[in-house]
Amino acid sequence: MTHNVTDTPLWQKLSDHHREVASTHLRELFDTDPNRGTDLALTAADLYIDYSKHRVTRETLGLLLDLARAAGVEERRDAMFAGAHINTSEDRAVLHTALRMPPEGELIVDGQNVIAEVHAVLRRMGEFTDRVRSGEWRGATGKRIDTVVNIGIGGSDLGPAMVCRALRHYADGPDVRFVSNIDPTDLLSTLTDLDPASTLFVVVSKTFSTLETMTNAAAARRWVTEALGDDAVPQHFVAVSTDEERVAAFGINRASTFGFWDWVGGRYSVGSAVGLAVMAAIGRDRFAEFLDGFHQLDEHFRTAPLESNAPVLLGLLGVWYGSFFGCDSRAVLPYSHDLARFPAYLQQLTMESNGKSVRADGTPVGAATGEVFWGEPGTNGQHAFHQLLHQGTRLIPVDFLGFAQPLADLPTLDGVGSMHGVLTANMLAQSKVLAFGKTADEIAAEGTETELIPHKVMPGNRPSTTILGTRLTPSALGQLIALYEHQVFVQGVVWGIDSFDQWGVELGKTSALELGPALGDPDSPAAVGDSSTDELINEYRRARDG
Ligand code: F6P
């Protein structure tokens, strides 16, 4: 086993193989292999995953699986599940999978049974959210809580915000809103129609020191205390953090503090107490179903042979396009409006995890790493950026996500079909057209004017995965998230990087703190070091001060 597989003859072999197959058209791959559509598909938990429309032969898949084995994907996976300190640059275990283990499990890490700790926190979350949802938990004036405002950023916002949106069909608790940005309009616009007496803030921060979150939390506390007095804080603020001391210093009771552990990375934390707002919205039973969905996919990843292991195959396909075809990005297109925030959620998951240029041992990576994820719900994207996907010069692999059963439906214009049926037909049509396109001959045969033919040619050969779930349930959502988490893991192992640190975000934070005084204080010198930033500060001051 080596962690530098990019330096091995196997990597070179894949590179040579890429040159051989890169120009083979998906039309040819399907024509010569009638069973491709059934053979290159699998089921992981409840998700049906079709990966036949990828620019791979069976030999390609075999070589990619060899690569996974050579990189030690299985060993690293087992080490992660066992609680080894695989986040080497921070010397931490990586155990988000423990957050979704059933209560009867046991996992001793650094002398503690982490499963017992996880379920103790889940029980406290359940008791607390039951009280909020039933109206037993009251604000300082005795009013029932009708709105929960989650204040957090990054993993302390994107996960719960995405999940609350995705599972809004199941929401039967208080209204839940999210504030993240240090742009004051975020907090102000969120609070504008709220009553402090019936509003509960959940301040979520692993470190309880993130500038955006602490600034918004302090402003929210002023909003509450100006209306209700200082004594109102305990009834209107709870916290989710690993740092109990800082939470206490903010004025939040220990009994209202929900902890998690340094072995839960922010972007992997929505199954921990970071999901408190989700539990408030959908209740503890639905939250348990959500965690069970994660666990089902975790078990698939942990036990399925590599050849039929969905996160392994999809992660390797990401390596194939990123490191061999030179693709920069992957579009994730949910044909489910409730999943509108899913691509944004995945951006942190994939880009903060695998946007690295050095391996875990500090040496430069040997290949392009880190896929850029982006996307919008279908069919909206079809009327915006699909033109580029179909006929542009860039190759952008696509993940289509859809569900067989709607959560709600309406008839079509003609009253015969259902809108959900049309939505799904659009998803299937997009993957088909991307893959197979339309040739100049086919277009000419339709009687198209000669000069228009080149404009209408659909080149096809544009790869996609289609992930079809039965219904967008809490469990299905947990499965989907875990499917992507483990792809990120597989890619990180192949590239040899530490997917669980994020040192690259630190310098920007420090620099913003240094620049703050120059912007705020007119007497402070604007000379901060480079002529561009200095002039921008001067221009900002001129424009601000009129
Ligand atoms: O700046 C990046 C980051 O550290 C993310 O990894 C994290 O999710 C986010 O900030 C928020 O951190 P915290 O939960 O400690 O406020």
Image (tube, helix red, strand yellow):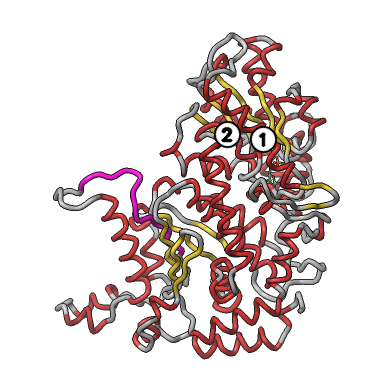
Q: Residue at x 63, y 16 (%)?
A: 224
Q: Report whether the residue tagged 1 is closer than 8 Å to ligand 1.
A: yes
Quarter of the rendered structure image containing ligand 1: top right
320 over 250 or under it: above or below: below
Direction from residue 3 to residue 342 in the image, left or right: left
The residue nearer to you, when weighing 48 against 373, is 48
Residue 479 location (% of width, % of height): 53, 55
506 relative position to 408: left or right = right
- 441 above or below 473? below
499 over 306 or under it: above or below: above
Residue beneath the point at 36% across and 52% down: 380
Q: Is residue 8 left or right of residue 126?
A: right
Quarter occupied by residue 136: top right
Main secondary structure along the magenta-highlighted residues: loop
Q: First in sequence, mark 1 or 2: give its number.
A: 1
Q: Are the residues flagged by discs 1 and 2 in contact, CB closer than 8 Å?
A: yes
Q: Quadrant of residue 23?
A: bottom left
Q: Residue at x 48, y 20 (%)?
A: 193
| Crowd band around label 1 with a 10 angstrom C-alpha radius: few (<14), some (14–19), many (20+) | many
Residue 103 percent coordinates (x, y):
66, 45
- Identify which residue, 347 or 453, lies in the foreground: 347
Q: Residue furthest right?
A: 111
The image shows residue 243 at horizontal and vertical percentages of 79, 36
Quadrant in which the N terminus is drawn: bottom right
The three-letter amino acid code for the residue at tag 2 is Ala
Evaluate whether residue 204 shows in this view: yes
- According to the picture, the residue beneath numbered tag 2 turns out to be 277
Where are the magenta residues, as a range? 399-411
The tag on residue 204 is 1
Residue drawn at the location 56% of the way across and 89% of the way down:
17
